[in-house]
Image: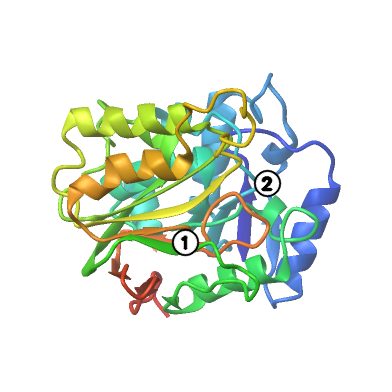
Amino acid sequence: MVGVVAPAASVFGRSVVTRGIRAWEARGFRVKVFEQVFQRDGYFAGSDRERAEAFQQAFDDPSVDVVQVIHGGYGSTRLIEHLDFDKIAASGKAFVGRSDLTALHLAIARFAGLVTFYGPGMADIAPPRGSDFTADALVRALTGAVGTVPQHPEDNQVFTLSPGRVSAPIVGGCLWPLCKTIGTPWQPDLDGKIFFLEEVGEPPWSIDAHLTHLAQTGMLNGVAGVVVGRLVDCDWSDRRPESPNNLSLDEVLERHLTPLGVPVLIGVPVGHERDTATIPLGIEGVLDASAGTLTFDQAGVMP
């Protein structure tokens, strides 16, 4: 059973919920949508306490095997102080979400020690926001080893920035909310890890600022490798032809990541796209930047 909650934003209309349920049911799964998903408190799906209670209930509910968010938004980080991570750890359940949910991925990893899954919310697994590719990739991640992260047949966006091969645990998420964890107890430890990042709607100078912030904290000094997922609607170089001195997104990435001297792969199909894969966070992955692949031979959940 998939339990669906909204740790951040509410949904606008039930159609995306219905389509998501159908996508799960078509693949043999049952779904339980917690009513909190439809609550509203400004730009949140209920108060901090209400969202935290629903999130905790999903982990405590014996009928639920997988906890998935409905979608992102903002507000996940505000739940952390209200959660019982000992109970979350004892549940051993899979958690699925992306974007703003990065804070919860990092907190669960730090305080509960569980592998989590960076992937779409239920609103994003069915058309028009999602696709069969996206839903099938999510099921693949939850039911066994991902293997080589799948790529849509028409996708040609993956490229090598710095060649090399490394095996290490993978940690990360969406860049903006990840940087907001710096200085908190759930700030990620990237030393000896493959650092994964993706983003949406942030222009090159914003990506530059986030990577500069990470570098100035020293967090990037010991990374084993870098996987950049999809940076959707982030390259603004074609929007400002009157400003030829603007840096392109590729130039920003090259300036920050090449000096690290580790394997770097750009464009892995994970992030805010219609056709997106799901990856486990917290287990060992094999980054072969020379071959253009990211592989997980270990299952993220118990069979």
Amino acid type indicated by mark 1: Val
Q: Position of residue 36 (x, y in %)?
A: 68, 37
Above or below, 201 relative to 278:
above
Place residue 21 in its image quadrant. bottom right
Which label sits in the foreground, 2 or 1?
A: 1
Above or below, 288 relative to 195:
below
Place residue 237 in its image quadrant. top right
Amino acid type indicated by mark 2: Phe
Res 45 seen here: yes
- Is 206 left or right of 284, judged from the image as shown? right
Picture residue at 55% right of the left edge, 38% below the top = 234
Q: Residues within 10 Å of mark 2 (few under 14, many from 20)?
A: some
Color scheme of the displayed model: rainbow
The number of discs equals 2
Q: Give the alpha-carbon distance from disc 2 to disc 1, as whole Å.
A: 32 Å
Question: Which residue occupies the foreground of this view, 217 or 135?
Answer: 217
Picture residue at 54% right of the left edge, 76% below the top = 140
- CB of mark 2 within 8 Å of CB of mark 1? no
Residue that label 2 marks? 34
Res 77 seen here: no
Q: Position of residue 7 (x, y in %)?
A: 56, 37
Q: Position of residue 69 (x, y in %)?
A: 59, 48
Above or below, 46 relative to 64:
above
Q: Position of residue 181 (x, y in %)?
A: 34, 31
Return the disc, 2 or 1, that comes first in the chain's sequence: 2
- Which label was assigned to residue 182? none
Residue that label 1 marks? 268
- Which secondary structure lies at badge 1? loop
